[in-house]
Amino acid sequence: MAELQLKSHRFRAEREADWRRLESLLARVEKGGARKLNRDELVEMPVLYRQALSSLSVARAISLDAGLIGYLESLCTRAYFFVYGTRSRPLERLAGFFIHEWPRAVRELWRETVVSALLMATGTVGAFILVTRDPDWFYGFIPAELAQGRDPTATTQALRDTLYHKATAHEAFSTLSAFLFTHNSQIAIFAFALGFALCLPTAALMVFNGCMLGAFLALFASRGLAFQATGWLMIHGVTELFAVTLAGAAGFSIGWAVAFPGERTRVDAAADVGRRGATVMAGVVVMLFVAGLLEGFARQLIQNDIVRLSIAAASVLAWGLYFYLPRRERFA
């Protein structure tokens, strides 16, 4: 035992100065980043790291005391992340998210996106047909607080005025604020969060969201305002509905992983796809904010139907190219 302690003492005495030097450099880096080191110190860091790694290997081989081994393991781990770890600034991380991570996550969910879009389209067509045949169906799809008087009892002129009402700046901001915390943002969140329940709640939400759209379009179409209403809705609706569709796709991916985990446990399968889904949802928040700006400002400032539809078409093209245009991927 005395011989082992002597061996450990000699081992530490011969190398401890280098370990302390490495530790002091790491402390400076961890407080202020690599810019805290000069050029010579940056060159010195990998050398000190390899020496510490060699000391750890020797300490393990000759069974030195556990405290020393633990200290060296911690020191080498910290140095590893400096020498080999990826270091990026916040702006670089943000650029990486928008340029690579978010579009890649969306492309990987293309099957779920197709399913989500088809369910929403089914709800839209179904509700449109039902409301066209019997206007009373409208009340089954659109809550009164959402309709705000735009229902089958409204006059044609009142509905037309809705499409061409010029909002004040205060009203525009109120519309934006209300939008960010109302039905579509809630549907997007619930569609993702409830996906684990074997996709069923998510599917129901996609159909229901489509039904609301179809009911509104049917109401305006019954008064000869289908073209005008489409421009009024789609100037922001393209971005808004695409965001909800992606949220549904993320929810479907989780539900599918839970239902069919393969060789993984259900928890592991859900965690794997959940990380990708979380990336998609982070982008969905951005899309909903953009849709809120379009609804609160562009829709009311722009009164021309052709311009409204042109912006909607440009939105389709922009989002399609952004997500699905082939690009060189960055690999870590």
Image: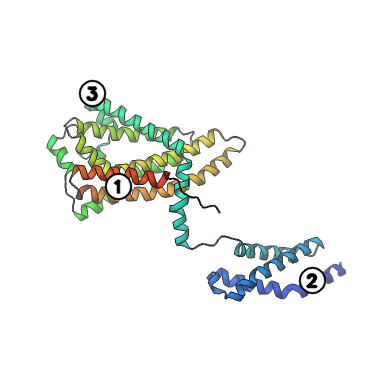
Task: Name the disc covering residue 124, or none.
Answer: none
Q: Is residue 150 visible?
A: no
Residue beneath disc 3: 133
The quadrant of the rendering that contains the C terminus is bottom right
On the picture, is 160 further left or further right than 234?
left
Secondary structure under the numbered disc 3 in the rendered image: helix
On the picture, is 327 further left or further right than 42?
left
Question: Which amino acid type is shown beneath numbered disc 1?
Answer: Phe
Quick one: 286 or 107, which is closer to the camera?
A: 107
Secondary structure under the numbered disc 2 in the rendered image: helix
Question: How far across and down, in percent of the image, does residue 60 sit?
Answer: 78, 61
In primary-sequence order, the first of circles 1 and 2 is 2
Crowding near the residue tagged with mark 2, few <14, some 14–19, many ≥20 C-alpha atoms within 10 Å: some
Secondary structure under the numbered disc 1 in the rendered image: helix
Question: Which amino acid type is shown beneath numbered disc 3?
Answer: Arg
Query: Which of the 4 image quadrants contains residue 64?
Result: bottom right
Find the distance from the CA under tag 3 to the CA under tag 1.
30 Å
Looking at the picture, does residue 166 appear above or below residue 190?
below
Question: How far across and down, in percent of the image, does residue 71 sit?
Answer: 70, 66
Q: Is residue 66 visible?
A: yes
Task: Name the disc covering residue 179, or none.
Answer: 1
Residue visible at 23% across and 31% down? 218
Residue beneath disc 2: 11
Crowding near the residue tagged with mark 1, few <14, some 14–19, many ≥20 C-alpha atoms within 10 Å: many
Query: Which of the 4 image quadrants contains residue 42?
Result: bottom right
The quadrant of the rendering that contains the N terminus is bottom right
Query: Which of the 4 image quadrants contains residue 34?
Result: bottom right
